[in-house]
Image (spheres, rainbow, N blue to C red):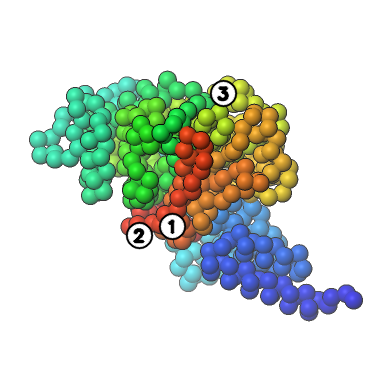
Amino acid sequence: METSITEKKKQSLDLKNLGNKEVGKKNFEKAIDYYTEGISIFPTAILYSNRSLCHIKLEHYAQALKDADQAIVLNPDYCKAYYRKGDSLFGLGKFEEAKEQFKKVVFKRPKDLDSRKKFIICKKEIEKIQNSLRLAALVKYTNNSTNWTQYEIEKSYNGPRMENDTITKEFCEELINHFKNYKKLPMRYTLKILNDILILFQTLKTVTDVTVQEGQNITVVGDIHGQFFDLLRLLEVNGIPSETNMYVFNGDIVDRGDFSLECVLLVYSFKLLYPEHVHINRGNHESAQMNYMYGFYREAEEKIFKEIIPVFEKIFNHLPLVTLINEKIFVCHGGLFPRDDVTLDEIRKIDRVRQPPQDTYTTPSLFTCLIWSDPGRAKGRSTSPRGTALIFGPDVTKKFLKLNNLDLIIRSHEMKLAGYEIMHDEKLITVFSAPNYYGTSGNKGAIVRFDSNLKKKIIQFDTVGVKQSGKYGFSMF
C-alpha cells in the first residue's frame, strides 16, 4: 500500500527530530544519516538546512553549500538557508559572497544580531586579506628577514637560554614553562629557530624514511591547530621527544587556535634538537591561503613582525609530505589518490617546494590528495564534500597498501569525537590531537604510538580547559 503524503511528512519529521538530538550530542555524522533518510522520504528546506549545518561543523563546506542551495530552491523565503549558505561560503574562503548572503538575512530580519555580526566579520576579513596580500606583494623574502644576529638578548630577560646560540634539551624544557606562562621568546631566539629550521627542512626529501629500532618507540600526532596547552598535555601524557621517544607531527600545527606560534616554535625546537627523531609532515593548513584565512599570519604579524610572513611561507613549502615508518606504515595528513597505480617512487618525486596546487576533484594532484583527501566507507572514489581532492574507499586503501608492500595508513585532517577512528578493515587510522576543537566540539584528543615491532597503542586525552581560540582563529560556527 502506497504511503500517503501525510505519513511521509510525519516520517520525515520524526527523522529530523532524531537528527536534531544527535546534533545536540555533537554527533554530526549520525545526524547527517537521519537528515539524509528524511530527505529521501519527504525533502524539506529545513532538512537540507540542518544537514548543511552538520557539514559545516565537519568542515565539509562544499557539500554544506550544496545543501543550503537546495534548501533555498525548496523554500526561497527560508532565511536560515541563506544563513547556512553564508557560513558555507565563509568556510570556503569566499568572504565577498558570504557577506552577500548575510546581507540578505539582515535585510529580511533586521533584528537578527547574529547575521549582522557575521556580515561585519566578513567585511573585516575581506579588509584583512586585502591588507595581507598587499604586504605579501611588497615584501620579498631575504635572508635579512631571519637575521637573528642583529638582535641582542635584553638584560632583564629571565627565560630559557640557548647555549652558544644552539638549542639544548634544557632550552626546550624551559621553553615549555616559558610559553605556559604566556611569555614571549626574544626576537634573537625566535628568528634563530626559524632560520635554522628552514636550513634543515631544505635538506629533507618529500618522503621521510624512519626506522624505529629496539628500545625506541614512535608516536604519530594529529592536528594541533594552535592549541598549545593541549599540546603540553599531550607531551605530559606521552613524554617529551627524545632519542628513544620519537615523534611524527602529522601537519596542521597552526591556524584556528591562538597559540600557533608557540606550537611551531616548540615543535621546531625539538626537531632541531633531535633531527633524526622528530619528524614533521605538511598539512593543508601549512599553506598561505589557509594561513591568511584562519589566523596564523595575523598572529605571526602581531607576535613577531609583518615581514616574517614570507619566511613562514618558505618554511612550510619545504615540509615533507609523507613519513614512512619501518617501510610499513605510511603517514600523511590527508589521504590517497585518483589512481590505483601510484607508487612510493612516484610520491618521492613530487615537487613539494611550492604552494599546494589549486585543483579540483576532476584533476587532483598527488600533492593535493596527500594533504586534503579523506577516507570513506563506500568502495571506490567520490567527490569530496570539502570541494577539493577526493573521498577514497576501503578497496582503494587495500590496493595502495598491496602495491607498495605496506601494512597501514595513518592520517589526520578530520576531527573525531574519540580523537581517532579505525577504518578500512583496520588498515587505516585517523588521528586528531586537538581536544575540544575550537573550544566547542567536545571531542577527545588522541595519538598513536608504536614500538619497534610496530605494535600500536592508541592514547586518548582530554583538553586542559584553557581558552585557546577566539583572537586569531575565531570560529564563525
Residue that protrudes farthest toward the right in the picture: 1
Mark earlier in primary sequence (1, 2): 1
Residue name at image x 53 percent, y 60 percent: 102
Q: Earlier in the sequence, mark 1 or mark 3?
A: 3
**Which element carries disc 2, helix, strand or loop?**
loop
Can see residue 34?
Answer: yes
Amino acid bearing label 1? Asn
Residue 80 quadrant: bottom right
**Alpha-carbon neighbours of circle 3 within 10 Å: few (<14), some, or many (≥20)?**
some
- CB atoms of marks 1 and 2 within 8 Å: yes
For marks 1 and 2, give the CA distance. Answer: 8 Å
* Quadrant in which the N terminus is drawn: bottom right
Looking at the rendered structure, the kind of residue marked 3 is: Arg
The answer to whether one can see residue 284 in this image is no
- Callout 1: SS: loop
Which mark, residue 436? 1
Q: Secondary structure at mark 3?
A: helix
* Amino acid type shown at disc 2: Gly
Neighbour tally class for label 1: few under 14, some 14-19, many 20 plus, Cα within 10 Å: many
Q: Is residue 285 left or right of residue 68?
A: left
In the visual, does 230 lie left or right of 148? right
Residue 444 in the image: above or below residue 314: below
Against 95, residue 138 (above or below) is: above
Query: Which of disc 3 and disc 2 is earlier in sequence?
Result: 3
Does 455 sit left or right of 267 as displayed?
right
**Residue under circle 3?**
348
* Pointer 2 residue: 465
